[in-house]
Image: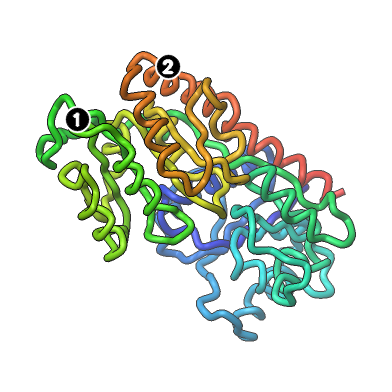
Amino acid sequence: MIKALVISYFGDTKVTKPEVETIVGLKKLGVDITVMTLGEAESIPYLHKNGVKTIDFYPVKKYSFAEMKIIRKELKTGKYNILHLYNNRSIRYGIVASFGLKVKLIAYRGLAGNIHWYDPSAYLKFLNPRISKIICASEATTKVISDNLFWKKDKAITVIKGHLLSWYSHAKNVDLTKYNIPKNAFVVVNVANARKMKGIEYLLNSSNYLPENLPIHYILIGRGIETEEHIEIVKKSKYKNNIHFLGFRKDALNFIKSSNVFVLSSINGEAVNKAVIEAMAVGTAPIITDIPGNKGMVKADKSGIIVPIKNPKAIADAILKLYNNRDLCKLYAKNSKINLENNFNIKSTIEKTFQIYSKLSK
């Protein structure tokens, strides 16, 4: 029997749902699986309902010998075949805690970048020889890892983080007139936290490349997104009255569903962006940049539009193309939903993860 210990911080259920569903799916396939996470995690009742054991522990310090000993004790008493580590902290702790034990380590990597063979800290995580497999969220991530491994380059393997359309069926349309957006508006939405890699300045600057006086409105949702830099860009935009910062919202999915187009303007680092997945699931046409991590999310000119990075004019041209052709916009929205169902399905994630567990347990 395969016996696995999973360590991660399963906080916000909306963020960790693919991981939680993968764990439940593995349990149904016969894996004796235990999750080590904080007892207050939102997913705990759901895991228990599906027969998954949990341990109320997650390391709170960056490095702690005492916390490492807790993990090591569980590995010894539990006699696990697999130790599955979902984030940087659990990877660091798992490598040290499993030293000298027969358990096989699996690490998860989402972002496509920031791993270099010449960086000593990389050998405390993904490039450590103690790790048997690195499950990567995209082909781009797999390539980055493989390119920086000196041996066993095949230890990096792509397993797309799957979803189900039913997870997003609760989304509802919002009355956007309450946010000073007229009923006939063509709405462009972006949901992101304020990080430079998100390229929000290029999305905002795209408004200056649109013809004047069109009923096109921008909605931007996320923590810290209304920065001084972004406000200055909006002040100089000829569409300044049509750009709306709504801050962080728990109902962001409803605004995505109520929009015509979702624009991902990221300039690096992404891998299967969650907000784009949500847009695809609720039938909002996606426009994304051509960074490696986005590869495969959109089929160009079939289920959306792909534009170059740091190119506000290209973003504007893509928005204008869908504004002028609403049927095409609806077609991309429909096809993106089909693409999500066929190529980003949680069933495939569970099956591929189970295959990895099985091979490592032999």
Q: Amino acid at mark 1?
A: Pro
Residue beneath disc 1: 215
Q: Which percent across, then down, holds residue 188?
A: 31, 36
Q: Secondary structure at mark 2?
A: helix
Q: Is residue 267 left or right of residue 203?
A: right
Q: Which percent across, then down, holds residue 15?
A: 45, 50
- Residue at 15% x, 45% y is 241
Q: Which percent across, then down, holds residue 344?
A: 57, 33
Q: Which percent across, then down, holds residue 32?
A: 67, 50
- Residue at 56% x, 61% y is 8
Q: Is residue 358 above or below residue 76?
A: above
Res. 214 image quadrant: top left
Instruction: Name the mark on residue 331.
Output: 2
Res. 331 image quadrant: top left
Q: Tell me if residue 337 can be seen.
A: yes
Q: Is residue 158 left or right of residue 207?
A: right
Question: Viewer-proximal residue, 361 or 280?
Answer: 280
Q: Earlier in the sequence, mark 2 or mark 1?
A: 1
- Residue at 30% x, 41% y is 207
Disc 2 + disc 1, Cβ < 8 Å: no
Q: Amino acid at mark 2?
A: Leu
How many marks overall?
A: 2
Q: Residue furthest top?
A: 327
Q: Is residue 164 above or below residue 126?
A: above
Q: Is residue 148 left or right of residue 174?
A: right
Crowd around label 1: few <14 · some 14–19 · many ≥20 (10 Å): some
